[in-house]
Image (cartoon, rainbow, N blue to C red):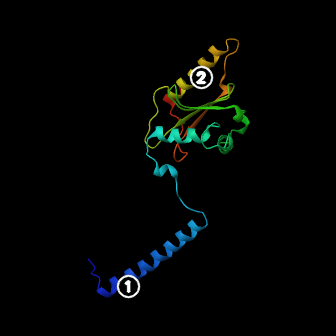
Amino acid sequence: MTEFTQEQYQKFFFVFVKAYKEYENKVKERRARGIHDYNVFDVLDTKEVKHSKFIASLLDPKGLHYQGDLFLREFIDACGISDFGLDTSNAQVFREYENIDIYITDGNKHIIIENKILYAKDQDKQIYRYIETIKNENSSKNENSSLDNDGILVLYLTPNFDKTPSQKSLN
């Protein structure tokens, strides 16, 4: 085992402090330019219901943010589903609707959002049940037509966009 002298310790800490100060300066520069790793969800309680409540409040065109359908349109655009055809100006947003974390509909098109936080597991037939619920509700409202899968879109939100629904939740 090698022993360090007082001089070696001082030299090491001098180099370490210098490198750390350079790092701090780079972080300050990045923050000043608006480049940072701040994530509002890291500060919120980690409960899925609170995440869903926050997201739904932003997406709701009639929300207290007074931005109309701006956030919903931007969300749809960011998700790459602009061609789905949801009328955002006529949309309603529901939270915990028939156990669906967030449900968005304009009466013709339906978006089901399953919001998964870290370590949350899928339930058996979870996504399947949500789709069937929306199909059944809408076919009973309009007995002359049945809702097909083209009118329903499921978004599966995860913190790192790295997870897909499990097979057991789909069928």
Secondary structure found at label 1? helix
Rendered image: mark on residue 134: 2
Q: Give coordinates of residue 58: x percent, y percent.
A: 59, 42
Residue 53, numbered label: none
What is the CA distance from the residue labelled 1 to the residue labelled 2? 68 Å
Between 43 and 80, the residue placed more toward the observer is: 43
Is residue 61 shown above or below 135?
Answer: below
Q: Quarter of the image for the N terminus: give it.
A: bottom left
Dot 2: element: helix
Residue 94 image position (x, y, % from top left): 57, 31
Q: Please, which residue is most extreme toward the bottom here? A: 7
> Can you say whether 20 is above or below 68 in the image?
below
Relative image position of residue 42 (x, y in whole percent) = 47, 51
> Neighbour class for label 2 at 10 Å: few (<14), some, many (≥20)?
many
In the rendered image, the vertical position of residue 31 relative to residue 170, given as above or below: below
Q: Amino acid at mark 1?
A: Lys
Q: Is residue 161 above or below residue 2?
A: above
Q: Residue at x 67, y 11 (%)?
A: 143
Tag 2: amino acid = Ile
Tell whether 116 sits left or right of 81.
Answer: left
Residue on which the image places disc 1:
11
